[in-house]
Image (tube, rainbow, N blue to C red):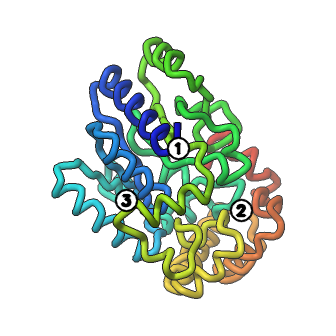
Amino acid sequence: MDLERKAIERVRLASEMSLNYYGLPLVCTYSGGKDSDVMLELFKRSGVPFEVHNSHTTADAPQTVRHIRDTFRELELQGISCTVDYHKKSDGSCVTMWNLIPKRLTPPSRKIRYCCSELKEGGCKNRMIATGIRREESYERKERGMFEEISRDKSNKAILPDEKMLLTDNGDARRLFERCQLKAKTVVNPIIDWKDNDVWEFYWNECKRHNPMYQMGYYRVGCIGCPMAGKGRRKEFADFPSYKRAYIKAFDRMLEIREGRGLTNKWKNGEEVFLWWMEDTDVQGQYIMEFSGADLQKIIEKGKI
């Protein structure tokens, strides 16, 4: 069975589960990147009913935001329900990258990815969703499975949702859903075993719409300044200097709040924080910051951040 056919069969199985156990269509999560566009095309070819969901991160490039809007406009004309989550709170305000940084009192890093937790992974509660996650993308994703149950365990040391790996056999997956009380978000990863070359070939040859960022020399499309992008961040901030200014402003506010709470600061201003943050050579230095004698990890474990 070739990769495309296998992925479509996974989508169809997940759709059957979503309709049977949730009573709602499967949700295709969409970020505007190549993996999302590949997923979307596979959904169209599967023939299943589906909805599309985007989490607005506030840190995506303008080209990506326009690509998402254009894609959603086309899908809605075809009768497909599309939702953009702006992370609105009960008081009417929205969670953004720029107010998260002062709230969390530390810049996001490879180890502390609160931005992903709050701006990308919190939507579609109590639904079955499909993502474009692939094992080849990172070491952490090598153990990811075709079907997963996502739950949040506050006793867990990690601040990201705990992930319980599920069996990939169709029959076992169905039995798991029959036992499940459906209180958690469940996930299918149809292209989990695709290689980079598989994705690129399908993307350029089969997908009709393409994010302009890839024609600007980008291999990865995501939040501008994401620490996971490594040295690619320098090109991002050169191309999008307004985002650099936004981060520095957020870091300035972060330092003000830290000082107001009597916390130790080793920087004079947001620009110094930005320069340190961009070095990305000492992950441990990013991970542990002094908070009046208590390290950041202990504070996280106590749920104070």
Relative to 47, 164 lies left or right? right
Residue 43 vs 149, above or below: the answer is below
Q: Which mark is residue 263?
A: 2
Whether residue 126 appears in this view of the structure is no
- Secondary structure beneath disc 2? loop
Do the residues bearing badges 2 and 3 touch, measured as CB atoms within 8 Å?
Answer: no
Residue 102: percent from left, percent from top: 56, 65
Residue drawn at (34%, 59%) of the image: 93
- Using the image as rendered, state which of residue 190 and residue 19 is in the foreground: 190
Residue labelled with disc 3: 94
Q: Disc 1 residue type?
A: Leu
Residue 278 placement, left or right of 207: right
Query: How would you rate the neighbour count of disc 2 (Cα within 10 Å): few for under 14, some for 14-19, many for 20 or more?
Result: some
Instruction: From the viewer's side, name the closer residue of 158 and 30.
Output: 30
Q: Alpha-carbon distance for marks 2 and 3?
A: 26 Å
Which residue is depicted at the point 37% across and 54% down? 54
Q: Position of residue 69 (x, y in %)?
A: 30, 66
Question: What is the three-letter code of the residue carrying label 3?
Answer: Cys
Nearer to us: label 3 or label 1: 1
Which of 282/256 is in front?
A: 282
Whole-number angstrom distance, CA of label 1 to CA of label 2: 52 Å
Q: Secondary structure at mark 3?
A: loop
Residue 41 in picture, x, y percent from top left? 37, 52
Residue linked to disc 1? 3
| Disc 3 to disc 1, C-alpha distance | 39 Å
Depth order, front residue of 204/34? 204
Q: How many numbered markers are drawn?
A: 3
Which one is earlier in the sequence, the residue at label 3 or at label 1?
1
